[in-house]
Amino acid sequence: MRDDRTSFDVIFHDPPFEENSEEDLQLLFGLVRVGGWLFHERGDDRVLSPGGVEPVERRRYGTTRFLIFRPRGLRSPC
């Protein structure tokens, strides 16, 4: 059982590229502190919006894509 007090400032999510990971993201959103970051790595151009949450930023590095989510707060990870 998960301790409900557990939360993180930054979460990196790197699932296998072929997987549909929207369910994973919805669970991970519950672990990110308000103002924290969730970086989701992808191998395709699909933009996920689990539960209607849009990424605040999208980045591409070669064949790797990152969807960057933030529950509330600033919009730039740098």
Image (tube, rainbow, N blue to C red):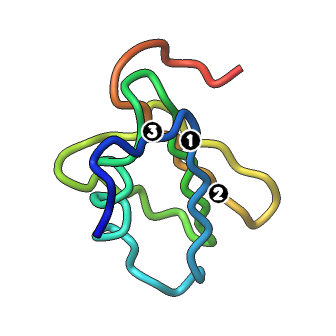
User: Residue at point 65% right, 43% down?
Assistant: 59
- Provide residue 29's location: percent of width, then percent of height: 34, 48
Q: Amino acid at mark 2?
A: Arg
Residue highlighted by disc 2: 65
Residue 58: image tag: 1
Q: Check the image and name the residue furthest to the right.
A: 62
Q: Amino acid at mark 1?
A: Arg
Front position in the image: 46 or 33:
33
Packing grade of label 2 (10 A; few <14, some 14-19, many >=20) is some
Quadrant housing residue 63:
bottom right
Q: Amino acid at mark 3?
A: Phe
- Local SS, label 1: strand
Q: Is residue 31 above or below residue 27?
A: above
Q: Is residue 54 above or below residue 72?
A: below
Label 2 vs label 3: CA separation? 13 Å
> From the viewer's perspective, is the residue at label 3 or at label 1 nearer?
3
User: Residue at point 44% right, 21% down?
Assistant: 35
- Provide residue 7's location: percent of width, then percent of height: 43, 41
Label 3 vs label 1: CA separation? 9 Å
- Provide residue 54's location: percent of width, then percent of height: 32, 40
User: Residue at point 49% right, 29% down?
Assistant: 36
Front position in the image: 68 or 35:
35
Quarter of the figure with the N terminus: bottom left
Label 1 vs label 2: CA separation? 7 Å
User: Residue at point 26% right, 42% down?
Assistant: 53
- Local SS, label 3: strand
Residue highlighted by disc 3: 69
Quarter of the figure with the C terminus: top right
Packing grade of label 1 (10 A; few <14, some 14-19, many >=20) is some
Front position in the image: 71 or 62:
71
- Local SS, label 2: strand
